[in-house]
């Protein structure tokens, strides 16, 4: 039985590494430009990549920025909705060519993928029921806090992402008296708070502000940013070692200069978050 | 006094009146064969007697006790089951319980009945061994002592039907009913079953036999009842009804029957 | 993976899988008898005539219930059971595992009830009639005559559901039960992919054992044909 088990493991490993080995053969830029299409992995959330509820069209800050970059490079932008859990697998298996989805830059991600220059500033926000804000902010100990599994919020909470000099309050210390539960997505984190199965959601401020609006079902929640748990930067992820990253960086710089990026930021209420 | 008295029995399914105003009686130790073409109502009559169907009208009396009266509310519970046990029934398709051995098939019902006895808990062992002994005797009477521990699927059709007969005998019914007991059997297996029934007749078992075997009915039955279209057409001594029928309808049935018999046998 | 860290990861996966096994065992213990009860409900003849049509409230209710449970995704039911009370202004459920167990027991009971119903309907009428003419009560006919035949007939289908259940336990990660796939996801998000694929081994090994056990049960009933 042990023998069969270890043989199975080896087989699975061999299969999964083989996929990555092939990826190295051709220049990534040649591969993408040769295809004439940039396959962009996204998940749907406002105000980054989302469907306009009235028209059903895909819109959002990242959506429009990606389209502008692709137009500049003379290729087509093709958006593919992926499971956030599987984003690395999607990227490495070439189902997608990049992750352009308000992704925080972390040291780990920088190690595993090739990441663009930062283009948006993000911070971690606490989301809770409006009627309970006072009570929770008075003493956070004893409450249940949720964050997206693998997100920056979780990293900060558990201390796996080290605090840098932008941090004013250490999330790990601040929430040390709380019960932490990881959930599948930021949207799920807000659902937990709304249904009362958790008290606080620690999520990206960009995402929280996009979802908690007076016209949404989360209108009874509030976004609290009293504590600055540190700043993060959004970047675009490409396959590790990709030479396409530099081309995108160049293109974004060009779009910044001609004012396109600032225009987009204003349209989606992200002017303050824009990195000049 | 007759052991069985049936008066004015009728039954309809939807629009169709399957049996109509059936009356007859049966003496203790008598065997009565019921013959007739398919659809004549003979099986329905048997099912009405054994409480598998509820007649619309009529009265059934066993040894003077009313076991069914369409004008009265149906008895329930213990009384209904006591009435039920006045009759035994052997099915065309045996209906043995596949998960039990031949012996257990024979003894199961008796064991369940014994549980209701007041002294069951105190004498459980003795009661069960008596039942087992009686079951073996019942199997012996149908010549299947050797097959007591076999499961139904290990037995031939003829053997299965003999177990079914032993199972019915075990509860000592006043009247033992057979519903075409050999119709589901290959021709070479009918003999062993008919022999068992014949030996029961020799021991003066009171029997009602719905059958297609005319020769057998003539030899074994004391009386024969011919049904057609849901009514009794002719009733009389076996050799009279089969050997020398009075009614035109009986004659036609017997003729057609023997023709079919010959043609199907080549 | 044959490194010290590999051992730690395998240990964490095993911790997660223990949760899958707990959900599996408790769901099985709860849903088989509940399935039997639901089956009785869906076969209930209790009712009355309304304007010449037969109206059987218990049967109608249970069949409607089974339709809803079988007609909606298990994952959605998990979300509904766990988040529903809080969203409807009731006290929220605090235990994710409890919500999972409640959902799984109900869901699998509905499937089992239909399998049982099919099994009972397939038993020939003659078995009931034979029991009746031998003076058995309805209860005796069911338990002494019919039940074991039904068990034999439904074992292959029930076995199929049981093997599906082993895998379905992983759906609980949608409400953040830290079962094996949830644990493996943690590593995937860190760029470590082998743990995710290795979970397959856990499922395969356990389902292998389940298959062997089911085979034994089927062989135990080989002595008769039904």
Image: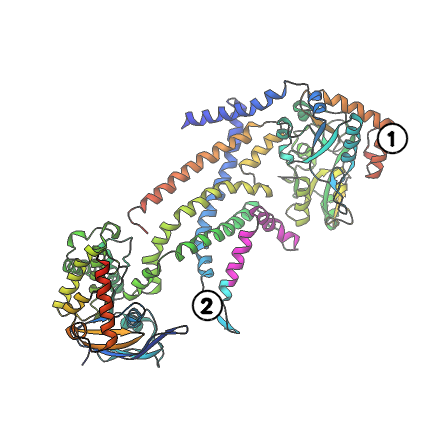
Q: Which residue is mark 2?
A: C46
- The residue labelled by disc 1 is A259
Question: Taking C58 as reference, is C98 above or below it?
Answer: above
Q: Residue furthest right?
A: A258
Q: Residue B182, image x and y in percent?
A: 23, 61
Using the image, determine if residue B3 lies above or below residue A232. below
- Whether C164 is drawn above or below C84: the answer is above
Measured in 3D between alpha carbons, the distance from the residue under mark 2 to the one under mark 1, in whole angstroms, is 76 Å
Q: Position of residue B169 (x, y in %)?
A: 20, 64
* Range shown magenta: C60-89
Q: Are marks 2 and 1 in contact (CB under 8 Å)?
A: no
Q: Chain of mark 1?
A: A
Q: Position of residue A217 (x, y in %)?
A: 72, 50
**Residue at the left extreme of this rendering:** B202
Image point 44% across, 44% down: which residue?
C160
Q: Can residue C163 be seen in the rendering of this structure?
A: yes
Question: In the image shown, does B197 or C29 lie closer to the viewer?
Answer: B197
Could you tell me which quadrant the N terminus of chain A lies in? Answer: top left
Q: Nearer the viewer, residue C63 or C182?
A: C63
Q: Chain of mark 2?
A: C
Q: Front-most of A74 and B165?
A: A74
Q: Is residue A164 left or right of residue C36?
A: right
Residue B233 in the magenta stretch? The answer is no
How many residues crowd around disc 2 within 10 Å: few (fewer than 14), some, or many (20 or more)?
few
Q: For label 1, count other residues whose C-alpha is less than 10 Å away and answer few (under 14), some (14-19) or many (20+).
A: few
Q: Is residue C59 above or below residue A134?
A: below
Describe residue C34's horizontal placement relative to residue B253 as left or right. Answer: right
Residue B85 or residue B133, whichever sits in front: B85
- Look at the magenta stretch and give its main secondary structure: helix
Q: Which quadrant holds residue B21? A: bottom left
């Amino acid at each position: 039985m042990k023998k069969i088990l270890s043989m199975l493991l080896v087989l699975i490993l061999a299969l999964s590494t083989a996929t990555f080995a092939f990826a190295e053969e051709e220049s990534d830029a040649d591969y993408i430009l040769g295809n004439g299409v940039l396959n962009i992995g996204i998940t749907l959330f406002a105000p980054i990549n989302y469907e306009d509820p009235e028209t059903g069209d895909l819109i959002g800050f990242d959506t429009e920025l990606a389209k502008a970059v692709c137009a500049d490079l003379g290729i087509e932008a093709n958006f593919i909705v992926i499971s956030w859990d599987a984003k690395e697998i999607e990227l490495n298996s070439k189902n997608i060519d990049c992750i352009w989805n308000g992704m925080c830059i972390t040291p780990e991600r920088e190690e595993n993928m090739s990441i663009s220059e930062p283009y948006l500033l993000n911070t971690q926000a606490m989301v809770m029921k409006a009627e309970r804000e006072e009570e929770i902010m008075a003493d956070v100990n004893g409450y249940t806090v949720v964050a997206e599994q693998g997100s920056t919020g979780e990293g900060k909470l558990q201390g796996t992402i080290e605090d840098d000099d932008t941090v004013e309050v250490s999330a790990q210390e601040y929430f040390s008296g709380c019960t932490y539960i990881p959930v599948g997505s930021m949207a799920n984190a807000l659902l937990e708070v709304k249904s009362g199965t958790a008290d606080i959601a620690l999520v990206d401020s960009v995402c929280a502000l996009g979802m908690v609006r007076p016209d949404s079902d989360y209108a009874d929640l509030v976004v609290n940013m009293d504590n600055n748990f540190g700043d993060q930067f959004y970047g675009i992820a490409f396959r590790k070692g990709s030479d396409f990253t530099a081309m995108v960086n160049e293109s974004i710089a060009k779009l910044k200069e001609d004012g396109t990026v600032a225009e987009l930021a204003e349209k989606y209420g992200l002017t303050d978050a824009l990195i000049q | 006094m007759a052991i069985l008295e049936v008066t004015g029995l009728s039954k309809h399914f939807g629009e169709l009146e399957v049996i109509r105003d059936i009356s007859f009686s049966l003496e203790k130790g008598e065997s009565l064969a019921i013959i007739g073409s398919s659809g004549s109502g003979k099986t329905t009559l048997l099912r009405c007697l054994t409480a598998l169907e509820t007649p619309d009208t009529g009265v059934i009396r066993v040894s003077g006790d009313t076991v069914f009266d369409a004008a009265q509310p149906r008895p329930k519970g213990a009384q209904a089951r006591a009435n039920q046990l006045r009759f035994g029934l052997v099915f065309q398709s045996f209906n043995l319980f596949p998960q039990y051995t031949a012996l257990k098939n024979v003894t199961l019902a008796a064991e369940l009945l014994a549980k209701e006895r007041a002294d069951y808990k105190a004498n459980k062992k003795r009661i069960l061994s008596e039942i087992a002994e009686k079951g073996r005797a019942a199997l012996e009477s149908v010549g299947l002592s050797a097959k007591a521990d076999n499961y139904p699927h290990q037995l031939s059709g003829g053997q299965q039907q003999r177990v079914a007969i032993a199972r019915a005998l075990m509860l000592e019914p006043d009247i033992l009913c057979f519903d075409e007991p050999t119709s589901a059997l290959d021709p070479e297996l009918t003999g062993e079953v008919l022999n068992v029934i014949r030996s029961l007749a020799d021991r003066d078992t009171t029997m009602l036999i719905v059958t297609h075997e005319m020769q057998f009915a003539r030899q074994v039955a004391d009386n024969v009842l011919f049904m057609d279209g849901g009514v009794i057409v002719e009733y009389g001594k076996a050799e009279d009804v089969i050997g020398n029928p009075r009614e035109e309808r009986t004659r036609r049935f017997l003729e057609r029957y023997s023709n079919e018999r010959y043609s199907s046998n080549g | 993976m044959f490194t010290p860290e590999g051992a730690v990861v395998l240990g964490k996966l095993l911790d997660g899988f223990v949760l899958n096994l707990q959900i599996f065992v408790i769901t099985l213990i709860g849903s088989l008898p509940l399935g039997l009860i639901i089956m009785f409900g869906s076969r209930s003849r209790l009712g009355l005539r309304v304007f010449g049509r037969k109206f059987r409230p218990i049967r109608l209710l249970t069949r409607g219930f089974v339709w809803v449970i079988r007609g909606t995704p298990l994952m959605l039911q998990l979300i509904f059971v766990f988040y529903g009370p809080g969203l409807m202004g009731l006290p929220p459920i605090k235990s994710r595992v409890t919500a999972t167990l409640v959902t799984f027991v109900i869901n699998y009971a509905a499937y089992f009830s239909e399998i049982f119903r099919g099994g009972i309907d397939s038993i020939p009428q003659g078995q009931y009639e034979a029991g009746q003419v031998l003076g058995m009560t309805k209860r005796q006919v069911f338990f002494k005559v019919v039940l074991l035949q039904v068990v034999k007939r439904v074992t292959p289908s029930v076995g199929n559901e049981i093997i599906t259940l082993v895998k379905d336990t992983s759906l609980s990660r949608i409400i953040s039960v830290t079962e094996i796939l949830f644990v493996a996801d943690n590593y995937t998000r860190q760029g470590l992919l082998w743990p995710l694929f290795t979970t397959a081994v856990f499922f395969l090994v356990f389902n292998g054992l389940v298959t062997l056990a089911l085979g034994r049960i089927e062989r135990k009933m080989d002595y008769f044909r039904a």
